[in-house]
């Protein structure tokens, strides 16, 4: 709640206490969060505004990624002969872990913020065209990011992979954001996913299946393709449809190869 981030280390060879706390540090720009403990006297956000705010911090507000470019480089290194010498420019697993990024939402300026996992220094701050608070996000292992907000839309992003961002980005996003993808952005918005009529509350993605599933405040689940941003279908889960006419909302969503 105080927007501090704890990091842990896993020691597989230890017999006890294999998971141990490493560091506990405050997140950069935590004064923009809605956490009460992070608010300071003189903040621009009043307690009254905080009570009726659409901003919140939850389990879907933070994710970690090494980015698409690093993941692609690791994949290429894995298929090289083991006898090949590693140059100073090649990326190893250790260096990839050190360059991991922490991506968060739920800030008062309606952006997602990318922090260095080592120093928690802010590397990027973008809204991707969202109008209003960004409620939740999810990241795939290969550098795709999806966000959902109060504006009833989801946005598909590419994390740190300029070539992929340029290839995926559609004309609407380039026009809406006011400038084409130039390859310099650490996070690049590529698609807008439509289909909801109420704010997004939860979402998940599966890069292998090329699927994004999102749930709204009204209890509707929408399915889109990840790489093209095409709408597939929408439905209301039976457990939420038996509400006697009242709107029911889902709060969490997880996906694997067989079940949503």
Image (cartoon, grey):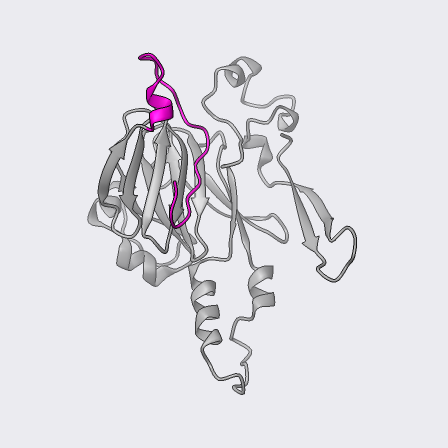
Where is residue 248? Give x, y as percent: 38, 20
Q: In this view, does 92 lie above or below 178?
A: below
Q: Does the magenta stretch include residue 27?
A: no
- Residue 177 seen by the camera: no
Of 78 and 184, nearer the camera is 78
Quadrant where the C terminus sits is: top left
Quadrant in the picture for the N terminus: top right
Query: Residue 110, how many percent across, how many down?
Result: 43, 32
Q: Looking at this view, is 208 or 129 the one in front? A: 208
> At 55% across and 63% down in the image, what residue appears?
96
Q: Position of residue 203 (x, y in %)?
A: 40, 38
As drawn, is 90 to the left or to the right of 199? Answer: right
Label tally: 0
Residue appearing at x 29%, y 58% in the figure: 166
Q: Is residue 185 shown above or below 136?
A: below
Query: Relative to 205, is 47 above or below?
Result: above
In the rendered structure, does residue 239 fall within the stretch colored magenta? yes
The region drawn magenta spans 237-260
The front one of 125 and 134 is 134
Answer with left or right where residue 164 lies relative to residue 80. Answer: left
- Place residue 224 in its image quadrant: top left
Q: Nearer the viewer, residue 148 or 132?
A: 148
């Amino acid at each position: 709640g105080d927007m501090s981030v704890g990091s842990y280390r896993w020691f597989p060879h230890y017999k006890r206490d294999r998971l141990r706390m490493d560091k506990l540090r405050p997140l950069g720009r935590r004064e923009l969060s809605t956490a009460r403990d992070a608010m300071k006297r003189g903040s621009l956000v009043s307690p009254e505004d905080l009570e009726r705010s659409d901003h919140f911090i939850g389990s879907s507000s933070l994710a970690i990624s090494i980015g698409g470019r690093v993941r692609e480089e690791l994949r290429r290194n894995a298929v090289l002969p083991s006898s090949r010498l590693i140059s100073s420019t090649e990326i190893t697993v250790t260096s990839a872990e050190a360059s991991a990024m922490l991506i968060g939402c739920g800030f008062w300026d309606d952006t997602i913020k990318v922090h260095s996992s080592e120093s928690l220094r802010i590397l990027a701050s973008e809204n991707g065209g969202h109008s209003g608070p960004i409620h939740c996000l999810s990241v795939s292992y290969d550098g795709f990011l999806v966000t959902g907000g109060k504006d009833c839309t989801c946005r598909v992003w590419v994390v740190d992979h300029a070539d992929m961002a340029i290839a995926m980005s559609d004309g609407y996003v380039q026009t809406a954001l006011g400038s084409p993808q130039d390859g310099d952005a650490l996070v690049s918005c590529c698609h807008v996913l439509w289909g909801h009529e109420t704010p997004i509350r939860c979402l998940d993605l599966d890069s292998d299946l090329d699927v994004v599933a999102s749930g709204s405040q009204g209890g509707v689940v929408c399915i889109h393709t990840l790489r093209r941003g095409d709408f597939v279908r929408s439905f209301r889960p039976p457990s939420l449809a038996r509400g006697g006419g009242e709107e029911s909302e889902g709060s969490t969503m997880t996906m694997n190869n067989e079940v949503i």
